[in-house]
Amino acid sequence: MKNNYSKSLILLIVFTICFIYNSIAQEWVVPENKKKKTSSFKFSPTTISDGEAIFIKSCQSCHGTPGKGNFALLNPSPGDPSTEKFQNQLDGDLFFKLTTGRGLMPSFKNLLKEEDRWKLVSYIRSFNNKYIQPPLSAPSTGCKGCTTNVELIFLKDSSKIILKAIGSLNGINVPISEAEVSLFVKRYFGDMQIGKTVNTDSAGTYTFNIPNNIHGDSIGNLIFITRITDEKFFGETQDTIQMQIGIPINKPPLNDERAMWNVVKKAPLWLMISYTTVVLIVISCILYVIFQLFRFKRKSRIKKS
């Protein structure tokens, strides 16, 4: 009897420790300096509408429809954005979590511009009738009229690309040092990131290793997308640069052939035939039911007469 009591006590202690550890592990701590961050623009019906479109595309598969409680059953739970658990957080909390991601939730830092991430916060706040937007922060671009120029230099012998970021600050060109940079190659179904998000050196440069098996168009053109974030002066910028360094491929574009993702005229024949057949069967069934109703009504009249 005593042994059973001891075993039960040990199991209870182990379960309690696991529960506490799991609760701590699931707690998402936001740095104090990030909590105070606020949007640089006022939330409006337009920003809410834009945020809703982004939410449907990027968030709804896990978080479900706000207010419906139909979020995905994951661990940790993604939750419903309309609940108090979400709404009791600061704008900076929501923005930080959208930016960094954690576990199954991806980081949207390289997927969405800063403005779009704030529009998502705007949409989430639209479900809180008591919400009052805090004072706006200064735009991330610290100087009016500052511009950036990004140059990509391909080193053919080593299959590397040197990214060089130069900013114009008060009419003087300066290297954008210690800025976060990301390099992407444009693809049909989303941009493919090259390497990781990194920081430029004191000269405003960073060298990326380029895979040697990236396919380009018929003459090897690749479209590179550079994203630079410098919170102090130049804000968040994006540039597109085309370079002829890919493997030429003469395959027709994906939208030239019959495929499931194409327009109606170029949909697979089997799908068009199947769809047409189903529609004809449904119409035939409806007509048959109508015919039988008329037939039944006619027989009823004959019997009465």
Image (tube, grey):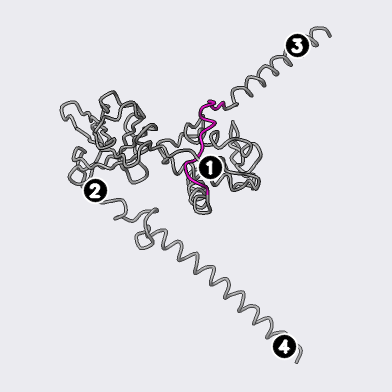
271 versus 121 height, above or below: below
For residue 4, above or below residue 259: above
Cβ atoms at labels 3 and 2 below 8 Å apart? no
Location of residue 180 by image quarter: top left
Which of the two discs, 4 and 2, labels the residue nearer the N terminus? 2
Residue carrying label 4: 301
Q: Residue sitting at 54 percent across and 72 percent down?
A: 284
Q: Mark 3 is on which residue type?
A: Lys
The amino acid type found where label 2 is placed reads Lys
Can you tell which of label 3 and label 1 is closer to the viewer?
Answer: 1
Q: Which label sits on residue 7?
A: 3
- Picture coordinates of residue 126 (x, y %)? 59, 48
Mark pair 4, 2: CA separation: 68 Å
- Along the polypeptide, which appears first: circle 3 or circle 4? 3
Nearer to us of marks 1 and 2 is: 1
Q: Report the amino acid beneath label 1.
A: Val
Q: Residues within 10 Å of mark 2 (few under 14, many from 20)?
A: few
Q: CA distance from mark 1 to mark 2?
A: 42 Å
Relative to the observer, which residue lies in front, 14 or 116? 116
Nearer the camera: disc 3 or disc 4: 3
Q: Looking at the image, which residue is at 35% across and 37% down?
A: 143
Range shown magenta: 29-43
Q: Earlier in the sequence, mark 1 or mark 2?
A: 1
Q: Quadrant of the C terminus?
A: bottom right
Residue on which disc 2 sits: 251
Q: Of all residues shown, which one is farthest toward the top?
A: 2
Task: Inspect the magenta stretch and tell me whether residue 185 lies in it.
Answer: no
Q: What is the number of the mark on residue 121? A: 1
Q: Secondary structure at mark 2?
A: loop
Which label's residue is closer to the chain start, 3 or 1? Answer: 3
- In-image side of 130 versus 257 (left or right): right
